[in-house]
Image (cartoon, rainbow, N blue to C red):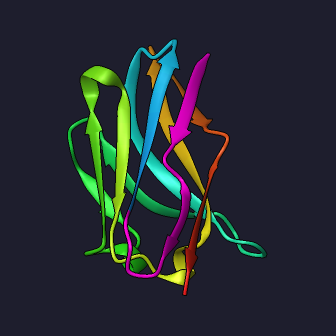
Amino acid sequence: QVRLEESGGGLVQAGGSLRLSCAASGSVFAINYMGWYRQAPGKQRELVARITSGGSTNYADSVKGRFTISMVNAKNTVDLQMNSLKPEDTAVYYCNALVSRGLELNAYWGQGTQVTVSS
């Protein structure tokens, strides 16, 4: 089993910055990728950013140029630096990881951390 522990959410004014961190622990044999999703009230969960173990990244169009994802492979951690935050970034942010164990692939989720951006 793999556990994802998130930290770093909170309340910030528009234009401000926050940094989210997620650490994977447990039976972490090989991480294919780690990423961040978010879900605002009344909306579907959406991908924010994702990074592979090789360092390839992809971002939602709405956060390109403002958010940066990074991963420290040796520590099985992924960070999301969020700058120039907007009220529409308000959501619960979830860490996600795809972990392989031999031929088996499993996706894991964190418990979520609230990010609130005030106008």
Residue 98: image location, x then y, percent: 48, 35
Which residue shows up at 44% across the image and 48% down it? 35
Give the total of numbered labels: 0
Which residue shows up at 21% across the image and 43% down it? 55
Residue furthest to the bottom: 119
Q: Is residue 46 above or below residue 86?
A: above
Question: For this view, does 99 lie left or right of residue 118?
Answer: left
Which residue shows up at 49% across the image and 18% down it? 25
Which of the pair 27/32 is nearer the observer?
27
Q: Is residue 8 on the magenta stretch?
A: yes
Which of the pair 1/86 is nearer the observer?
86
Residue 62: image location, x then y, percent: 41, 80
- Numbered range of the magenta stretch: 1-17
Quadrant in the picture for residue 16? bottom left
Question: For this view, does 3 lie left or right of residue 22?
Answer: right
Residue furthest to the right: 42
Which of the pair 73/113 is nearer the observer?
113
Question: For this view, does 38 lie left or right of residue 63?
Answer: right
The quadrant the N terminus occupies is: top right
The quadrant the C terminus occupies is: bottom right
Which residue shows up at 30% across the image and 73% down it? 66
Which of the pair 99/45 is nearer the observer?
45
Residue 12: image location, x then y, percent: 50, 69
Q: Is residue 97 above or below residue 12?
A: above
Residue 107: image location, x then y, percent: 57, 35
Question: For this view, does 53 lie left or right of residue 3?
Answer: left
